[in-house]
Structure formats: structure tokens, C-alpha cells
Image (cartoon, rainbow, N blue to C red):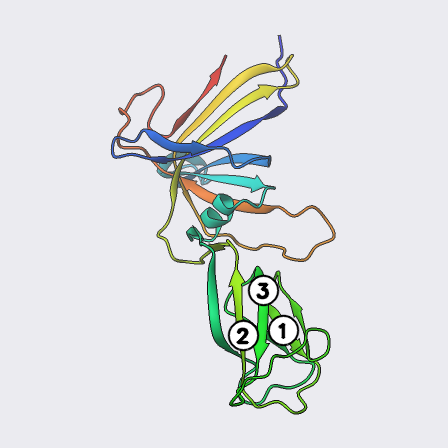
Amino acid sequence: MSTYASFQGRVFLGKRDDNGLPIEVRSPGNVAELKLALKTDVLEHYESQTGQRSLDHRMVKQKSASVTLTIEEFTKENLALALYGSHVTGTTGTVTAEPIGGATPIVGDRYFLAHPKVASLVITDSAGTPATLTLGTHYTADTDFGAVQFLDLTGHTLPFKASYAFGVATEIGIFTQPLPERYLRLEGINTAASNAKVLVELYRVAFDPLKEISFISDDYNKFELEGSLLADPTKPQDAVLGQFGRIVNL
């Protein structure tokens, strides 16, 4: 009896402890595609006796496998993994007399505060008795992004200074972490076989950095992670199951 396959399921990624056991396991959310590709590098031998130069032997020199993961959810954890970075969530705070606009600000140019998510913004000039600029008359502000554009500089003493409060924001660095290794688990169902359950475990996947990311797009954004499946030395060299992973039909 033939069994067809069409898989869906939930993917989990975890770090590995010193014993190779998964820790800090979480789901990256909706995974549109998960692929495993196996490859062998072979040495081929051709006989030289019959005049046919026939292939009579193949020797496997190397074995490798690659993993491709297409993720649709732009969480801080997913982006940190893809960017070889870390995510840091800041705290609230206040800033007093931060210079804004430089020595010679230009009307219409956009200037940026040191923090986004700004509230209670006050901009003053540098006169002996500082004058306070009026929002909508002397400048406009995008408080979410922490950006200012000046409308009228007449009669004010430069430079301008900004005082404000700022809210909590999460920052993600790029290329601040070494190559990440993850345990990968798929808790899947075979929709072509009455939703029979299938478990896939890949013990040790080393992910490459993100090749590209579409920050502006007309479609649902997604990003693709590729990596190499590595042998897990914490697993026994079992002739049946090996050190790379397993597929379990439940």
C-alpha cells in the first residue's frame, strides 16, 4: 500500500547545553517551508581494460546535508538568529539639553534624536534666557521615530537643544554573535495520510547569516535561513540512527 506525504507542522528551535540536550526551546512561529537536502561527494573509478572506459566503482569521500528554513514572523528572536545578533530591550529615561540640528540647521531637513518613542519634547535655543520653540510653528516632530524638522529659525540663537522622555524599545545588533548552532524539531502531520503524526529531529544545525531581507515589499514578508547539518558527538555512533537526526512515524 502506497503512503503519500504532504507535511505541515510546528517547528521548534533550541540551544544546546554541554551534553547536547536542547534548552531554551521555542517556536519561531509560522514556518512556510522546511527542507533537508543530503549530498555526497564521490570519487568515481573507470576501468581501462575493455576499451569502454566503464564506470565500475564509486567511493564516497564526504557526506553533507543542508537545512533551509523559511520563517514568516519577524520576532526579535528570529531576527537575532538571522542577523548573528542579540536583542536588547532598553528602559525608559529622560534626556536634558541634547543638541539637535547641528551648528547650522536647515529648514526642511530631518534631524534625529538619540532615542525613539519620545514624549514631552521641549526644544529651546541657546540665548542667555533660552526661548522655547513652538511645535507646529518652529518645528514638527515625529515622536515615534524621534525625528524633528525645523520650519522657522528666525530670531533664535543656535544651537538648539532638546529635552524629552523616551520609552522602552528593543534593539537588535548585526554580526555581534558567533555562528549559531540550534537543535531543530518538527512536530508534524502528514495531511496526505489522514494527518498521521511525524516527528523530525535534527540534533545540530549551524545557520548561515541571512542572505537578504525585504524591508519594503508588496507581499507578506518572509526570510530564508540556510544552514549545515552537523554531526552531534554527544550521540552514539549508532549504525541505525547515527549522529545527525531522525524521522519518527508516530
Estimate the x, y position of residue 71 in percent, counting from the top left: 57, 41
Amino acid carrying mark 1 in the image: Val
Q: Nearer the viewer, residue 97 or 141?
A: 97
Q: Look at discs 1 and 2 and give the one toward the viewer.
A: 2
Q: Which quarter of the rendered picture does the N terminus lie within?
A: top right
**Measured Cα–Cα span from mark 1 to mark 2:** 10 Å
Q: Label 2: few (<14), some or many (≥20) within 10 Å?
A: some
x and y, in percent, of residue 25 in the image: 42, 32
Report the side of 111 relative to 52 (left or right): right
Indicate the secondary structure of the residue bearing disc 1.
strand
Q: Which residue is mark 1?
A: 148
Among numbered discs 1 and 2, the one appearing first in the sequence? 1
Residue 47 placed where, x, y %? 39, 38
> Residue most toward the front?
129
Identify the element where label 3 is drawn.
Answer: strand
Q: Which residue is mark 3?
A: 120
Vertical order, 91 against 180 (above or below): below
Q: Residue type at mark 2? A: Ala
Q: Residue at x 63, y 18 (%)?
A: 4
Quote the CA–CA distance across marks 2 and 3.
10 Å
User: Which residue is under mark 2?
Assistant: 162
Q: How many marks?
A: 3
Residue at coordinates 52% horizontally, 18% vertically from top-left?
198
Check if mark 1's residue and mark 2's residue have beta carbons within 8 Å. Answer: yes
Badge 3 amino acid: Ser
Q: Could one spot residue 44 in this view of the protein?
A: no
Q: Measured from the top left, where is residue 197 in percent x and y?
A: 55, 15
Mark pair 1, 3: CA separation? 14 Å
Crowding at mark 3 (Cα within 10 Å: few <14, some 14-19, many 20+)? few
